[in-house]
Structure formats: structure tokens, C-alpha cells
Image: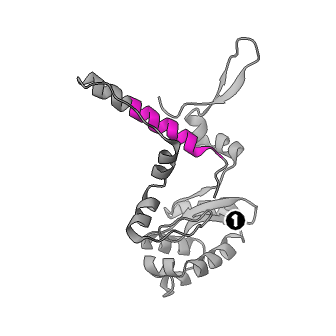
């Protein structure tokens, strides 16, 4: 899916800053000057990580899955009754077992179509159809609490407002106010490292 953000531009800047730091480190250890050749296309290809490697090994172009992952199943967003989406990752057998129990679907655990990682991948569409019908029955907060209680990775799918209101994001000061020399104070996003 298109992210809406210029991720390749952002990644190119990050790759470039890492290359500059490596060149400075090389210089500081007595090395000669360095020439950096950074291409946004190269950075875009590199950012696809193991998807590129999987293609190079298998020769198979992966199908597009929208908000779904390519590893084990389930690993994707689900719509809940309040219109909010949650992102659930229950790809290992223990996670899947705990998730099924937490969402009131213990019969899925022993179903031969879903009782192993390989079976869940093979019967991906069937499982996702069942889970979509389950998650739409209750609000996101209910599912998040139930799944967190049994240590299954789950989170809300946030828009920008709810992401900035998240307690952890606030604690990490990813939204700050600054003085402008000629205008009123204004808000900016923080720096993700100190």
C-alpha cells in the first residue's frame, strides 16, 4: 500500500547520515577521504529487506496484501465495531492459541486448517475471513485489553492525532512547543533520539 509519506526520501536521508558517520569514523582512524554515492532508488530497494531476498531466492513476486504481513498469519489490521482498527500479530503457535482463547474462538486452535504456522499460511483467506467476522463484533479497546491480558501483540491503528496523544509518545516528548522569534509559540514533532 502507498504509505502517503515520502518514505524513500526519509530513508535516503537516514542512509546518508549513516554513511557520513561511517566516513567520519574512517577518517578519525587514519583513513583517507571517502566518496559517498547515495541513490533514492537504491535506498528504496534496500528498504524492502527480506522481501527482495525472498524474491532473489525463490524467483516468485510476492502478492500484495495491503495491511497484512507476509510471515505467519494473522499479522494484520482488523476493523472493530467502533470503526477503529487494531493490528494483531499472533503468528507463533503459542500466540495463536492464546489469541483464539482470548477472542472466544478456542475451536480454531485444533482446526486442522489452522493448527500450525504452515496450515494458517495455506488457509490464510479462510482464517482472515473468520477473524474479520469476530473482531467486527466488539470495539477495539475491548479486543486490545483481552489480547494484551494474554500477552498477544496488538495495538490500535492510530491516526496522527491519536498517535500524538498516546501516553508513551507524550512521555517521549515527540510533540514539543517552541518559541518563534516573531510569531506565537508553535508545535513541532520532537527528535526520536537524544
Q: Is residue 70 magenta?
A: no
Residue 180 picture quarter: top right
| Residue at 52 percent of width and 43 percent of height | 40
Q: Residue at x 55, y 35 (%)?
A: 172
Quick one: 32 or 188, which is closer to the camera? 32
126, 149: nearer the viewer:
126
Location of residue 16 (image quadrant): top left
Q: Is residue 153 left or right of residue 66?
A: left
Q: For residue 92, which quarter of the picture?
A: bottom left
* Above or below 97: residue 27: above
Q: Position of residue 149 (x, y in %)?
A: 53, 61
> Crowdedness of circle 1 by 10 Å Cα count: few (<14), some, many (20+)?
many
Placement of 188 over or under 55, stated as above or below: above
Colouring chosen for the image of the structure: one colour
Is 165 in front, or is 9?
9
Magenta part of the chain: 5-20
Relative image position of residue 61 (x, y in whole percent): 50, 69
Image quadrant holding the N terminus, namely bottom right
What kind of secondary structure does the magenta stretch mostly adopt?
A: helix
In the rendered image, residue 10 lying in the magenta stretch gets the answer yes
Say whether residue 187 is left or right of residue 192: right
Give the labeled residue for mark 1.
Answer: 79
User: Which residue corresponds to the image point at 69% horizontal and 27% vertical from the top-left?
Assistant: 187
Residue 130: % across, % down: 63, 79
Q: Position of residue 178 (x, y in %)?
A: 66, 21
Amino acid at each position: 500500500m502507498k504509505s502517503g509519506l515520502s518514505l524513500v526520501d526519509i530513508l535516503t536521508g537516514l542512509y546518508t547520515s549513516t554513511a557520513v558517520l561511517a566516513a567520519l569514523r574512517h577518517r578519525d582512524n587514519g583513513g583517507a577521504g571517502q566518496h559517498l554515492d547515495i541513490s533514492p532508488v537504491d535506498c528504496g530497494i534496500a528498504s524492502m529487506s527480506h522481501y527482495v531476498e525472498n524474491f532473489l531466492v525463490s524467483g516468485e513476486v510476492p502478492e500484495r496484501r495491503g495491511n497484512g504481513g507476509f510471515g505467519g498469519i494473522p499479522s494484520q489490521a482488523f476493523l472493530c465495531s467502533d470503526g477503529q482498527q487494531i493490528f494483531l500479530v499472533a503468528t507463533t503457535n503459542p500466540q495463536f492459541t492464546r489469541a483464539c482463547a482470548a477472542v472466544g474462538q478456542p475451536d480454531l486452535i485444533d482446526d486442522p486448517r489452522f493448527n500450525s504456522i504452515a496450515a494458517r499460511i495455506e488457509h490464510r483467506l479462510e482464517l482472515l475471513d473468520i477473524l474479520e467476522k469476530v473482531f467486527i463484533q466488539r470495539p477495539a479497546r475491548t479486543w486490545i485489553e483481552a489480547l494484551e491480558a494474554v500477552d498477544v501483540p496488538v495495538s490500535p491503528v492510530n491516526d496522527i492525532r491519536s498517535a500524538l496523544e498516546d501516553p508513551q509518545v507524550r512521555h517521549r516528548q515527540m510533540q514539543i512547543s517552541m518559541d518563534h522569534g516573531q510569531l506565537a509559540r508553535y508545535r513541532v514533532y520532537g527528535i526520536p533520539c537524544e
